[in-house]
Image: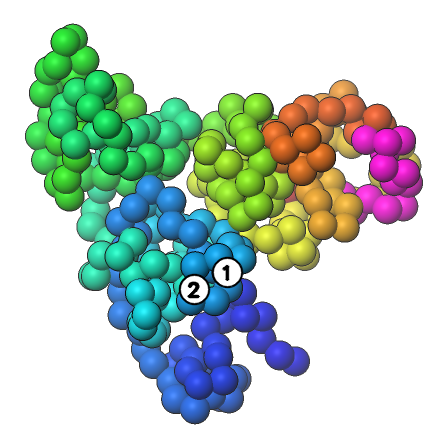
Amino acid sequence: MSLDRRLNAVRDDLADIRLRGRAVAARYAAGRPAVVATGLAPVRHEPRPGSPVGTFFHYGEAVRVFDEGDGYAWCQSDRDSYVGYVAADALSPGGAAVPSHYVRGMGAYRYPEADLRSPPIDFLPRHSPVRVAQAGIDCRGTSYAALADGGFLPEGCLAREPPMSSDLASAAAPYLGCPYLWGGRSFLGIDCSGLVQEAFRDLGIAVPRDTDMQRATIGIAVEIGAVAELARNDLVFVPGHVMIGIGDGGVIHAYGGDMRVRQDPLAGLMKRHGWRLADLTVRRP
């Protein structure tokens, strides 16, 4: 059985040394540690501009780099094992430092000065780990923190612990209205499986990135005889799409139909798309 190249660093010419004996390649490499140094780093299928994006790595995410050339690094995320090509200048060499704070809320803009009127230099998504070098820098009544690797964030955007939610549906709800973006995992743009992955992150649980992976691994499969049997936090899959049950027959999902995260009655979606109960796969976390 061939290895899934989304989750295994293997090419014809090079593979992760940990795959020796499982994958055939011309050579093998252990890779070197690096950290994502920009807010949102597109992960491309090929090392060229315009290549399709499979996902985004986020600020502070630890990766392992197996190859670098022509401005791109071929790397794998330590968080969800996703493999792809990232702009080399979006990475910093070395392992991830222990953070002092995390970005709470839905994200925060990083500024070159301790002043929200200065042009932002980056957007750090929810959960981004940061190291504060100096706190309590005041500007017109707003307190800022200077980051160890440069830039400033309003202190109100930071917390000592990662943000958490009470359950999966509650974790997904703040993304309502967020624009749909294929491969996206942040408030600036998110897709259906990215919404599931980031909602689980609010529960301190790491889950796979793509819909087919999630359908195969999260929770247990349950059969429902009617929409009313759908429970809050159930995951509802149809081919190429996933939704999160919110109770009372409703779901929240990142919907490509009108390009936003929205809340819908599942029965209405089934009627609109011609889905039958037999077409649904329900996984209960």
Task: Say whether residue 14 is left or right of residue 279.
Answer: left
Image disc number at residue 48: 2
Q: Residue furthest front?
A: 50
Residue 277 counted in the magenta span: yes
Q: Residue at x 33, y 36 (%)?
A: 124
The disc label shown at residue 166, or none:
none
Q: Which class describes the residues within 10 Å of circle 1: few (<14), some (14-19), or many (20+)?
A: few
Q: Position of residue 60 (x, y in %)?
A: 29, 47
Give the amino acid at mark 2: Arg
Q: Residue 85's x, y, as percent?
A: 41, 63
Question: What is the distance, in whole Å, between disc 2 and disc 1 at their CAs?
Answer: 6 Å
Q: Quadrant of residue 153?
A: top left
The residue located at (30%, 29%) in the rendering is 109
Tell me the residue at 48%/28% (across/down). Answer: 165
Whether residue 59 is in magenta: the answer is no
* Residue receiving disc 1: 51
Whether residue 45 is visible: yes
Query: Pointer 2 and pointer 1: residues touching (CB < 8 Å)?
Result: yes
Quadrant of the image for the C terminus?
top right
